[in-house]
Amino acid sequence: MTRVLNRDAILADMDGWPEKWQGVPSDIDVGRRLMAGMRPFAASLMNEGLAAGTVHRHLNSLWLLGGHIVATAQRDAGLRSLSGSEMLLQFVEPEGGPVCRHLSTEDEQRRFDATCRKLHGFLTASRPA
């Protein structure tokens, strides 16, 4: 079965991620700021002409990354003062992302890291010099 990209539905679903990541009330603000950094990247993925399955794989990795960052921000007050893009850049690097406790195989971590590398490239390319 071929997956189809419904851009509006995907972005609408992403708008609900901050509430789904929430563990404590202050997480909503952190999640919303993360979405401000993630949404342009998600839109760019959908505009690249990638296969729908590839886009969905990247979106699943973004979901995991956001949950990881929100949970970490509960313990690190310094993160809560950053913009969404700044928070993301604290966790993604040219080599990949953080070790994700929700992934059980090296292959899953490699796919997650591929998204983190792509996100890092997007964020650093769009930053003012």
Image (tube, rainbow, N blue to C red):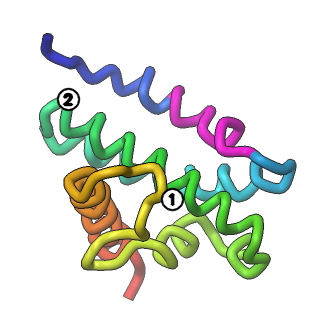
The image quarter containing residue 81 is bottom right
Residue occupying image coordinates x 20% and y 29%: 52
What percent of the width, then of the height, locates residue 12? 53, 27
- Disc 2 marks a residue whose amino acid type is Ala
Region of the chain picked out in magenta, as a range: 12-22
Quarter the C terminus occupies: bottom left
Q: Would you call the spot at circle 1 few (<14 residues within 10 Å), some (14-19), or many (20 or more)?
A: many
Q: Is residue 66 magenta?
A: no
| Residue at 73 percent of width and 45 percent of height | 22
**Are the two marked residues, 2 and 1, in contact with CB atoms closer than 8 angstroms?**
no
100 over 108 or under it: above or below = below
User: Can the viewer see residue 39 in this picture?
Assistant: no
Find residue 37 and name its label: 1
Label 1: element kind: helix
Which residue type does callout 1 highlight? Gly
The relative height of residue 108 versus residue 13 in the rendered view (above or below) is: below
Looking at the image, which is closer to me, 73 or 6? 73
**x%, y% of residue 42?**
37, 45
In three-dimensional space, the C-alpha distance between marks 2 and 1, rounded to whole angstroms, equals: 21 Å
Q: Which residue is mark 2?
A: 52
- Quadrant in which the N terminus appears: top left
State left or right for residue 54 relative to residue 35. left
**What's the residue at 35%, 50% (across, down)?**
104
Kind of element beneath mark 2: helix
Single out the residue that lies furthest toward the right.
25
Magenta-colored segment: predominant secondary structure: helix
x, y percent for residue 37: 51, 59
Earlier in the chain: of badge 2 and badge 1, it is 1
34 sits left or right of 109 in the view: right
Label 2 Cα neighbours within 10 Å, binned few <14 / some 14-19 / many ≥20: some
**Image location of residue 123, percent across then percent down:** 38, 69
Of the two numbered discs 2 and 1 in the rendering, the one whose residue sits closer to the viewer: 2
